[in-house]
């Protein structure tokens, strides 16, 4: 497998690896700065492809921060491989993620962020937002680059297949198709609808992001607030009704 690298916002690079067995892209995002920040590590078995993508942008040994939304193999499965390569690197996640999983899993202690805390990497300011169960998992959280107005979305706006790196329309329609198709099959019910879902998505929309950096599928440039609110309506429509 090989990774494809695309700059989707200033100094923000999408490193995408398509896995034909799963039929989806695994996208990591590197913010090139004084203290380079990588969002998602990718699964452990895809480390080499991700490593080569990062190496085409920076010296991987200079990586400083490794962020992720929640504890799952595509989010942080290769964390310890990165910690071996970049000796100053440190995982950065929410308090719950650190306490429940990462303190035990990581070969070096992570930096745990409080909700709303800002990580300064140089020119970029990354605000951590605690988002329990959005997209899923108790420890979920997202990062928002306040300088470039880029929301690192994790599994929100999930799209199947091997689409183009960056789009300016149709992202909600594509995400709807995936949510609908994921209602059945062995991987069904991946995203819950909870009493916190609407408020969390409204909070994300209020950030008014210009770029949505999507972990699986195309990233989006445009009115991110509108796209998030439309996605919230889709999630409520499809997942907010009782199902037995």
Image (tube, rainbow, N blue to C red):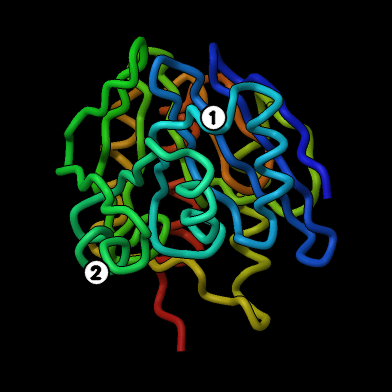
Regarding mark 1 in the picture, which secondary structure is present there? strand
Number of labelled discs? 2
For residue 38, the mark is none
Q: Where is residue 207 drawn, in percent x and y?
A: 31, 26
| First in residue order: circle 2 vs circle 1 | 1
For residue 30, the mark is 1
Please name whichever residue, 189 or 104, is drawn nearer the observer in this view of the structure.
104
At label 2, counting other C-alpha atoms closer than 10 Å, the crowd grade (few under 14, some 14-19, many 20 or more) is few
Residue 199 visible in image: no
127 vs 132: above or below: above
Q: Where is residue 30 drawn, in percent x and y?
A: 54, 29
**In the rendered view, does 27 fall on the left or right side of 120?**
right
Please name whichever residue, 78 or 168, is drawn nearer the observer in this view of the structure.
78
**In the rendered view, does 161 fall on the left or right side of 146?**
right
Please name whichever residue, 215 or 134, is drawn nearer the observer in this view of the structure.
215
Q: Are marks 2 and 1 in contact (CB under 8 Å)?
A: no
Q: Where is residue 24 drawn, in percent x and y?
A: 74, 55
Answer with the quarter of the image where residue 179 lies: bottom right
**In the rendered view, does 60 fall on the left or right side of 127?**
right
Residue in the picture at 20% in, 43% down = 113
Answer with the quarter of the image where residue 65 lies: top left
Q: Where is residue 79 drawn, in percent x and y?
A: 48, 54
Answer with the quarter of the image where residue 71 lies: bottom left
Regarding mark 2 in the picture, which secondary structure is present there? helix
28 vs 21: above or below: above
Residue 76 visible in image: yes
Q: How far apart are marks 2 and 1 (CA)?
A: 26 Å
Please name whichever residue, 74 or 239, is drawn nearer the observer in this view of the structure.
74
Residue in the picture at 32% in, 27% down = 126
Residue in the picture at 35% in, 36% down = 143
For residue 100, the mark is 2
At label 1, counting other C-alpha atoms closer than 10 Å, the crowd grade (few under 14, some 14-19, many 20 or more) is many
């Amino acid at each position: 497998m090989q990774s494809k690298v695309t700059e989707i916002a200033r100094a923000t690079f999408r490193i995408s690896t398509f896995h034909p067995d799963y039929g989806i892209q695994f996208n990591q995002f590197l913010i090139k700065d004084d203290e380079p920040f990588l969002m998602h590590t990718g699964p452990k078995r895809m480390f080499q492809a991700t490593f080569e993508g990062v190496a085409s942008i920076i010296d991987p040994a200079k990586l400083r921060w490794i962020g992720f939304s929640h504890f799952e193999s595509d989010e942080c499965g290769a964390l310890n491989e990165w910690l071996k390569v970049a000796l100053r690197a440190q995982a950065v996640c929410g308090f719950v993620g650190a306490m429940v999983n990462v303190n035990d899993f990581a070969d070096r202690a992570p930096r745990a962020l409080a909700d709303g805390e800002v990580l300064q990497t140089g020119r970029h300011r990354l605000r951590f937002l605690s988002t329990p169960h959005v997209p899923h998992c108790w420890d979920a959280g997202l990062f928002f680059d306040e300088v470039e107005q880029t929301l690192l979305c994790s599994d929100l706006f999930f799209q199947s297949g091997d689409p183009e790196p960056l789009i300016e329309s149709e992202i909600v329609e594509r995400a709807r198709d995936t949510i609908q198709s994921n209602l059945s099959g062995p991987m069904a019910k991946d995203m819950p609808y909870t009493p916190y879902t609407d408020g969390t998505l409204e909070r994300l929309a209020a950030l008014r992001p210009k770029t949505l950096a999507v972990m699986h599928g195309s990233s989006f440039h445009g009115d991110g607030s509108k796209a998030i609110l439309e996605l919230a309506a889709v999630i409520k429509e499809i997942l907010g009704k009782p199902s037995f």
